[in-house]
Amino acid sequence: MNTKKLIFSTVVIFIMYVLMDLTFYGLFEEKMAGKADRPASEQNQLLPFIFFGLFLASFLFSYLFDKLSDEEDKIREGTKYRIILGTFMYLPLFLIFYATRDTRPLDAWLINAAFHIIQFGIFGIVVAYIRGKVIIDSSGE
């Protein structure tokens, strides 16, 4: 494992995570707001926890890609791996949140899950390029 590429991919994914989440939740703020959400002032005080969580997810995302990918086609492998991981992570979690957390409608949770599944697919492609997965032609070169 190349440590420099791991660090670089972690930082890139972290930046993408923050920017994509800010954009998505900014565009759908009304739809995604729930009654169980903390007030904005409290959320702002807890930003270090949010950023640490996103950074940890970015690191694990980058680290696990190298461990779990086995094909040579970086786009296919990155997309497949990340969509599977995104679905595994977010769909069950958001269904549980719908049932237990607040009165946000089911479609808001499903839109949220779909966003993160697509987001993870994009992350997978980016990590595959950074980590150096290459397409090998039929001659093996």
Image (cartoon, helix red, strand yellow):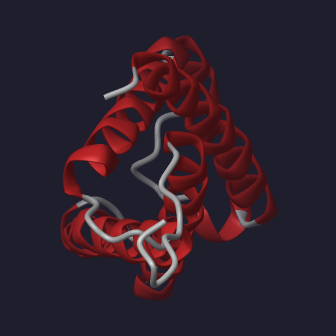
Q: Which of the two residues, 51 or 64, is positioned nearer the viewer here?
A: 64
Picture coordinates of residue 37 (x, y %)?
46, 45
At 60% from the left and 51% from the top, the residue drawn is: 129
Place residue 88 in its image quadrant.
Answer: bottom left
Picture coordinates of residue 83 (x, y %)?
40, 74
The mark tally for this picture is: 0
**Residue 130 vertical position relative to residue 46 in the rendered view, above or below:** below
Picture coordinates of residue 38 (x, y %)?
47, 35
| Quadrant of image for the N terminus | top left
**Residue 42 vertical position relative to residue 32 in the rendered view, above or below:** above
Tell whether 68 sits left or right of 36: left
Place residue 89 in its image quadrant.
Answer: bottom left
At 39% from the left and 77% from the top, the residue drawn is: 80
Q: Which of the two residues, 113 or 82, is positioned nearer the viewer here?
A: 82
Tell whether 101 sits left or right of 17: left
At 21% from the left and 73% from the top, the residue drawn is: 92
Q: Which of the two residues, 112 or 124, is positioned nearer the viewer here?
A: 124
Place residue 125 in its image quadrant.
Answer: bottom right
At 33% from the left and 50% from the top, the residue drawn is: 65
